[in-house]
Image (cartoon, helix red, strand yellow):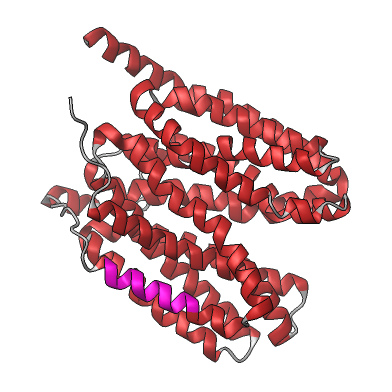
Amino acid sequence: MNRPKLWTKDFLIVSTANFFLYFTFYLLMATITLYATEQFHASPSIAGLASGIFVVGILIARLFAGRSIDRIGRKKMLYIGFISILIITLFYFFTENLAVLLAVRFLNGAALGIASTATGTIVAGIIPNERRGEGTGYYALSVTLAAAVGPFVGMFMIGHAGFNMIFILCLVLLALSFVSSIFLNVPKIELSKMELERMKGLKIGNFFEPKVFPIAIISAFVGLGYSSILSFLTSYAKEMNLVDISSFFFIVYAGTVLVSRPFTGRWFDTKGENFVMYPSFILFAVGLLLLNQADQGFMILLAGIFVGLGYGTFSSSGQAIAVKVSPKHRIGLATSTFFIFLDAGVGVGPFLLGLLVPFAGYHGLYAIMAAVIFICVFLYYFVYGKKAAGAERLMERAE
């Protein structure tokens, strides 16, 4: 039996657009602290705020974008996001002080939150149900590649081109993505009067999809674990005099995800979500334990492989579960709910975990995070895995 087609024109356009959105995100995340320091003589804490306030903007925007996207229209929401982020990126050329830079960073994050909620919702409507895990996995590669390539390009351009060329590159790539999105064919979702009525007011169900809470709560803990790598790996490597080799961690991570994603996505669809989710927690925990024990460069790179297999698999499979458990007319809310929790874990992590470092050190930090992720195995079982296993057994009996 022929499987539904996945690699359509629309799937390629929205995946490419999402790649450039996150490419500019990671490019600026990697360079904006230095920009704030060099251009405005910002202290390290304020320079860090200039980087981190971006995530606050993303979280707030997703709260409102998720509830509004199917009322406004998915393609219109994408246009709003792209036009907003293009206009706001222009303001980087005219920032004259730190206060303006902080405001621009916050609004930049909000615009990306709107646009990325739209791309995630649009692709969820394009991917055939029979290939949900595989398609979501391939789509999520756009973020994985951006996370590896963006910082590398940013650091290269700082040394060879300067900050204005970085902003110009962001504008050009975002403009190209916006133009390409015009050719998207987006399935329209017609909401009934009852559905529209339910979405009025400030009820929690209008900002979040409650059915996603089980997997979303777990994603917050997983995001917390990943933030320990994003925020402290460089400092940890510097402490051990392994900075040069540790710079390849994310390249190894991205390469591992690229190789594994086609298999994990297909297993999600054919063998069920539990088949990939349980190993993802264990592999991620092993990666963190390897960092805990690292005293040589190869152990850091080996950890990159396990983190790629663990966190890389969870991020796409968790999103696929969020879409799977939600009604079609609430896919936008489901997508935003999942990423709000995941981003909250990644965004709040540096502050919370930074309080642990003086007491536990970096070795202790990664041991604690490994324990947290291992506990997620049992948490997942009770909040979702047990139910998913039961549903799979019922389907097998029906067949």
Residue 282 sits in which quadrant? Answer: top right
Give the residue furthest to the top: 397
Which residue is pictured at 65% across the width and 69% down the height? 155
Q: Is residue 195 left or right of residue 392?
A: left
Magenta stretch containing residue 136, yes or no? no
Name above or below for residue 50 compared with residue 378.
below
Which residue is pictured at 74% across the width and 33% down the height? 289
Residue 265 x %, y %: 40, 34
Q: Is residue 194 left or right of residue 249?
A: left
Q: Where are the magenta residues, as a range? A: 169-180
Which residue is pictured at 55% across the width and 25% down the height? 279
Magenta stretch containing residue 177, yes or no? yes
Q: Is residue 385 visible?
A: yes
Q: Is residue 210 visible?
A: no
Which residue is pictured at 76% across the width and 56% down the height? 234
Task: Name the residue nearer the viewer: 316 or 372.
Answer: 316
Residue 319 sits in which quadrant? Answer: top left
Name above or below for residue 335 compared with residue 87.
above
Task: Name the residue nearer the viewer: 116 or 134.
Answer: 134
- What secondary structure predominates along the stretch shown in magenta? helix
